[in-house]
Image (tube, grey):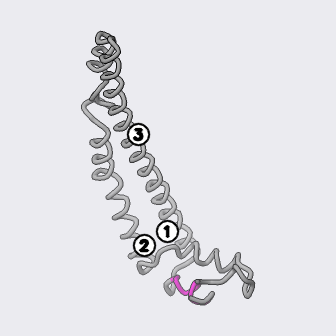
Amino acid sequence: MSGEELRSRRPDGVDDDTVEAVGSLSEALEYIERARGHLYSFHQLMGHADLLLGDTCDKLRDAGHADVADRLSDELVGRNVLYGRWTFQIVEEFDDNYWSLMREREREVREQLMGGQRHVFEAEMKDRRRTHGRPGHEATP
């Protein structure tokens, strides 16, 4: 893909304001994707912590501290992190209620306004900012 091909991602008749707006929508989706990754990290961290806490309770019992272990186990092991929810339920609800809808709408807007092209704003920025003809500044691999 040459510099011209980078610039040709923009469909005919699409103005700068539309390219910028659709680029902003794509950026919002990227932040949502990052938030989703953090949510999955939270899910995995909490799950691992719960397993460690269970193991800790076993060690406390083995060390003769059954009363301490029982209190920790009864109050915390397997406890909901939000009312009625373990973290897998939070992840599923986020995916079903928000993330999947955002991905769908971003794709629809891109198809409607940009002919389905992704990253038009960024492609044009790359072509403007790179030093044409300089190694390391190639338009494409």
Q: Which residues are magenta?
A: 4-10
Instruction: Kindly identify the amino acid type of the residue bearing the numbered disc 1.
Output: Val
Q: Nearer the viewer, mark 3 or mark 1?
A: 3
Residue drawn 42% across the image and 81% down it: 115
14 versus 63 height, above or below: below
Q: Residue 23 in the image: x percent, y percent? A: 53, 67
| The quadrant where residue 87 appears | top left
Instruction: Kindly identify the amino acid type of the residue bearing the numbered disc 3.
Output: Leu
The residue carrying mark 1 is 22
Instruction: Kindly identify the amino acid type of the residue bearing the numbered disc 2.
Output: Arg
> Do labels 1 and 2 touch, CB within 8 Å?
yes
The residue carrying mark 3 is 45
114 left or right, relative to 129: left
Residue drawn 52% across the image and 82% down it: 10
How far is mark 1 from mark 2, CA to CA? Answer: 7 Å
N-term mark: 2 or 3? 3
The residue carrying mark 2 is 110
Residue 7 forms part of the magenta stretch: yes
